[in-house]
Image: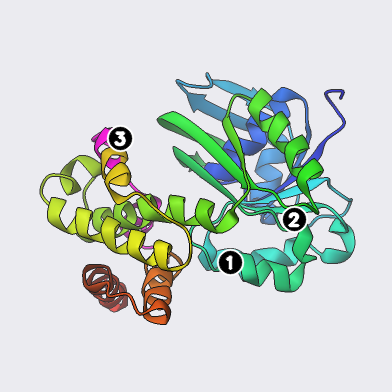
Amino acid sequence: MGTDDLSVAVLGPGAVGGLLAALLARQGASVEVLASENTARVIADRGLRIESQRFGDFQVAVRSAARLETRADACLITVKNTQLIEALERLPLAVLGEGLVVPFLNGIEHVELLRAIYPPSNVAPATIRVATARVEPGVIRQTSPFASVEIAASAANRDRVERLADRMKAAGLDMRVREDETAMLWDKLSFLAPLALLTTHERANAGVIRTRRRDDTVAVIREVAAVATAEGAFVDAEAVVRFLDSVPDTMESSMQHDQAAGRPLELDAIGGAVVRRAARAGVDVPITARLVEELRERALRPR
């Protein structure tokens, strides 16, 4: 396999998308980012700049457009859930064809939506664990010591998924191909939901919530694990607690950042999904439900 034989589109070159696009481009993939006309113009002019202790500081040129016009082997979807429907207008099925659709969205319910639009076997759900932020268009700062990606493969797309995974591993990411997408998505949500809900509710970082709000944090982890188990995806709640205890004190969530900036929250995709699936499974999640309701009410108040 050469260094220029994989073409990747990245829908939404923000914190996560910008990092993945830059790493893949530096490794040799042909990368095009899909963004608003203004953002696409800035990235076309300046490229992508990464500031990272793990990956180093570097700048790389990528192509950019407002809409996919030529076929790609894979499209990484890295927009927020709140922007997904509008953003998909940049990714027409007729152009993408048999290209993989690899969503890195928070939550669990977006997979069904994407499979209603694109061929189901071409949708390969993925998760990423990383702390990263968009400083300005085209400038990404990555701060966590960890940067791990998982993609779920099926019999129909395994070769294509493994080809992409090999390239992402070569780009420096910790990479794993999973067999069970339900387990993979719940593994991520079992950590993300408590982190996002509690850091946003408390307006504080991981170090604060795991001390000042420890009872609530552990309760949410156990509630999400119970819902996951009801859906056939065993989650070790105590292992999630240990992982949360291991992350840097300063770690914050993207939902917390969105709240501080007055942007729409991914509350429904992260917390709302847990509450809905809990109700369907007959699992009681009182702490999660209370946090979701209080954050929903807060979001409706005038600033």
Q: Nearer the viewer, mark 3 or mark 2?
A: 3
- What residue is pinned by disc 2? 66
- Nearest the camera: 245 or 130? 245
- Residue at left offset 62%, top offset 37%: 20
Specify which label sits upstream in the sequence, 1 or 3: 1
Q: Tag 3, which secondary structure? A: loop
Number of the front mark, 2 or 1: 1
Residue type beneath disc 3 = Val
- The percent coordinates of residue 79 (x first, y second) are 58, 56
Q: Earlier in the sequence, mark 2 or mark 1?
A: 2
Does residue 122 belong to the magenta stretch?
no
Q: Residue 228: percent from the left, percent from the top? A: 42, 62
Residue 137 visible here: no
| Residue 124: mark in rendering | none
Q: Residue at x 58, y 42 (%)?
A: 150
Question: Which amino acid type is shown beneath numbered disc 1?
Answer: His
Q: Relative to 53, does residue 35 appear above or below in the rendering?
A: below
Looking at the rendered structure, the kind of residue marked 2 is Ala
In front: 263, or 249?
A: 249
Numbered label attached to residue 247: 3
Q: CA distance from mark 1 to mark 3?
A: 27 Å
Seen at 66% across and 37% down, the residue is 21
How many other residues sit within 10 Å of disc 1, few (<14), some (14-19) or many (≥20)? Answer: some
**Crowding at mark 2 (Cα within 10 Å: few <14, some 14-19, many 20+):** some
Name the residue that disc number 1 marks: 110
**Which span of residues is magenta-colored?**
244-263
Q: Residue 33: x percent and y percent?
A: 71, 45
Q: Which quadrant holds the C terminus?
A: bottom left
CB-based contact (under 8 Å), mark 2 and mark 1: no
